[in-house]
Amino acid sequence: MRKPGVELRADPAYLQAFGKLIARIEESLAGYTGKAIPVYVAGGAAVHLYTGARYSGDIDASLGRRMHLPDNLEVAYRDRDGVTRTLYYDMQYNDALGLLHEDAHAASRPITVPGVDPRRLDVRLLSPLDLAVSKVSRLEKHDREDILALAQAGLIDSASFRTRATEALPNYVGDETRVRKSIEIVCKLLDDAAPGH
């Protein structure tokens, strides 16, 4: 499940479960002949696909078109350690609720999902920077861990993160003071985690 330029480090069993869920969405498009529908994957699922870190039990994704999703979007699988896990598509996810750069969808990275026709579903991961920015407005413990995992994989750094997050602020509605503090917290985390620090 990769395309040149996007190195996926996820557990192979997770990749297989992810592919099954996306294939079920494609199956629901029987008879559809329009342009490929973008699927923008965010959250812990995208972090795991990029880094292999923390398993996420849900897929946070937004669709580039309105469509009816099937009901059976849940898959059980065994991870690399033999632990039984469940992966489901989060029907409640909405990328309008957090901080997100206005060009995040345009900057997303396409991946190949075996068994899914890219002419029908264009599956994309938010870029590592936009993924980190999307976690700032909540910034719970697992969000910090996800951001650090992206940094440890060499996918983001403090300076680039600060620029992208600051550029995203004009489109954010909410307590901007709190979000600005969160940006500073993340920049310090990234600086502290930088090689040679």
Image: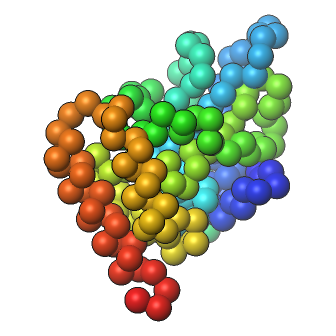
Q: How many marks?
A: 0
Q: Nearer the viewer, residue 38 or 192?
A: 192
Whether residue 191 sits left or right of residue 140 in the image: it is right
Which image quadrant: the C terminus? bottom left
36 over 150 or under it: above or below = above
Image height of 74 relative to 28, above or below: below
Q: Is residue 57 above or below residue 10?
A: above
- Name the residue: 40% across, 58% down: 162
Residue 54 locus on image (x, y percent): 47, 63
Q: Nearer the viewer, residue 3 or 106?
A: 106
Expressed as whole percent of the image width and height from the top left, the position of residue 34 reads 78, 11
> Does residue 155 sit above or below 27 in this rendering?
below
In terms of image quadrants, where is residue 33? top right
* Residue 32: % across, % down: 77, 10
Q: Residue at x 16, y 47 (%)?
A: 177
Q: Residue at x 38, y 76 (%)?
A: 191
Q: Is residue 84 visible?
A: no
Do we see residue 144 in this rendering? yes
* Residue 167 falls in image quadrant: top left
Q: How is the image coloured?
A: rainbow
Q: Residue 10: x percent and y percent?
A: 63, 61
Residue extending farthest to the bottom is: 196
Q: Write the residue at 49% across / 68% down.
A: 157
Q: Nearer the viewer, residue 137 or 122?
A: 137
